[in-house]
Image (cartoon, helix red, strand yellow):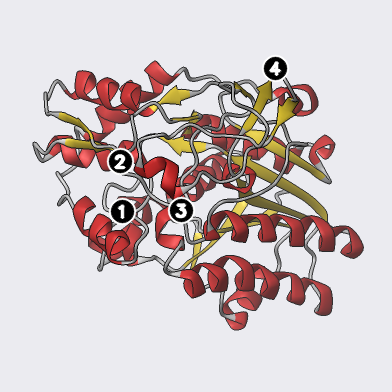
Amino acid sequence: MKHNILVTGGAGFIGSKLSFKLLAKGYNVTVLDSLSPQIHGDDPKSTSVLFRSIIDSVSFIHGSVTNRADWQRAIEGQDIIVHLAAETGTGQSMYEIEKYVNVNVNGTAILLDILANQRHQVKKLVVASSRSIYGEGKYRSEKLGVVYPNHRKADDMKLGDFDVKYPGCDEVLELLATDEDSKIHPSSVYGITKQNQEQMIMTVCPTLDIAAVAFRYQNVYGPGQSLKNPYTGILSIFSTQIKNGNQINIFEDGKESRDFVFIDDVVDATILGIEQEAANGEVFNVGRGVATDVITVAKSLIENYNIHVPINISGNYRLGDIRHNYADISKIKSLLGFEPAFSFEDGIRQFCDWVNQQAIEEDNYFTSIEEMKSRGLYK
C-alpha cells in the first residue's frame, strides 16, 4: 500500500530532494510551502529552480505553517508528516525574532494542536531539528573532564580572542564530537526555536499514539542550495562572492569549524527515519562526523571554480555564532545503519559543478551584513 506523506517546506533545498526520492519509492507526496522570496525569489514560477523541479510531480499547496486552514487542508488524508518548514539563519534570527518564533514555534504548535484535537490518520511525524540547539560544542578539559562552554564574550572577541573558555580552566580545550546526550544550550533565537520544535513534537506525539523522530541536521549543502539567500549557508554565500569576482570575507580567524553533510546523505538518513520502526521516539544527529574549518571551505571552493579571488580573514564576528561543532553519529549508525556516502571533497566537487551551470546571482552579502551591523550584532 502506498503511504500518503506530507512534506512541509517541500519546495526547499532538503524538501525538494526528499520529495523526489519519496516519489521514486512509491509514496504519494503532498508539499506545503510558503515559497519565501528570500529563498525562491519574487516570482517562484520563473526564479525558483527548486519550485519548478517539483510542481509537476507532487500535490502542491501554497500556504503557510502559521495558517491553521492551510495545515488542515494539508494534513487531510496523510499517513506521515515530515516537518521541514522553518525560518533558517542564525544571524537573522537575532533581530527578526517574532518571525522566527511565529513560523518555527507557533507553526509547530498549530500542527500539534490539530493533531491533538481533530480527526486524522497521521501515524508518524518526523521533524527537522538542528545542530544549533547544542550551542557551543562539547570539549574536554585535562583538569575538569568533559565541559560545555557557554557563549563567547564580545569583550574577548573584540580583542581577537575567539577560542571558547570554561570557568576554572586556563588550558586550551580539546574539541569533541557532540552526541545526542550533550548539553542543549542554544546561542541564537534560531537555535531556541529549533529546540522548542523538537521538544514539543517529541513530548506531544507519544500521547497521541504518533511515532515521532527528530533529526538534528548539521550544515547541509549540495546542488539545489539557494544561491539567493545571503543569510545562511556559507558555501552558497562564498560561491556567489567568488562568481561575482568579489573577495571572500571570513569571520574571526577562519579556524571556526562546522560539520558539512551532503544533501543526498541527509535525504537518505531522513528516509531511514521515515521507514524504520527503530527510529520511533528517537533523536538523531545527522552529519559526517568531521569538523572542517572555514578557511578550508573557502580554499576548496576557489580551487574547484578556478577563480582566484582574495580571501580576507577580517577578524569580524557575529554575536550568537558558535566556534565549533561537529556530530557524533554513532547512534544513527548503530540504530538505523546510516553511513555518509559523500566525502567533503566529493560533495564540494558536485556542488561546484552544479553552481557552474546556474546563472550568477547578485551578491547581496554585504546588505545582510549592514542589517546586522545596524543592530549591533556584527562587529
Q: The disc labelled 2 sits on which kind of residue?
A: Ser
| Residue 23 x, y percent position in the rendering | 55, 45
- Per the image, the residue denoted by label 3 is 90
Residues under numbered marks 1 and 2 in contact, where contact means CB atoms less than 8 Å apart: yes
Classify mark 1: residues with Cα within 10 Å, few (<14), some (14-19) or many (20+): many
Q: Is residue 51 left or right of residue 364?
A: right
Q: Which mark is residue 142?
A: 4
Which one is earlier in the sequence, the residue at label 4 or at label 1?
4
Front tag of 4 and 1:
4
Which one is earlier in the sequence, the residue at label 1 or at label 2?
1
Front tag of 3 and 4:
4
Residue situated in front as seen by the camera: 336 or 168 = 168
- Per the image, the residue denoted by label 1 is 229
Q: Is residue 35 left or right of residue 196?
A: left
SS of the residue under disc 4? loop
Residues under numbered marks 3 and 4 in contact, where contact means CB atoms less than 8 Å apart: no
Give the quarter of the image for residue 40: bottom left
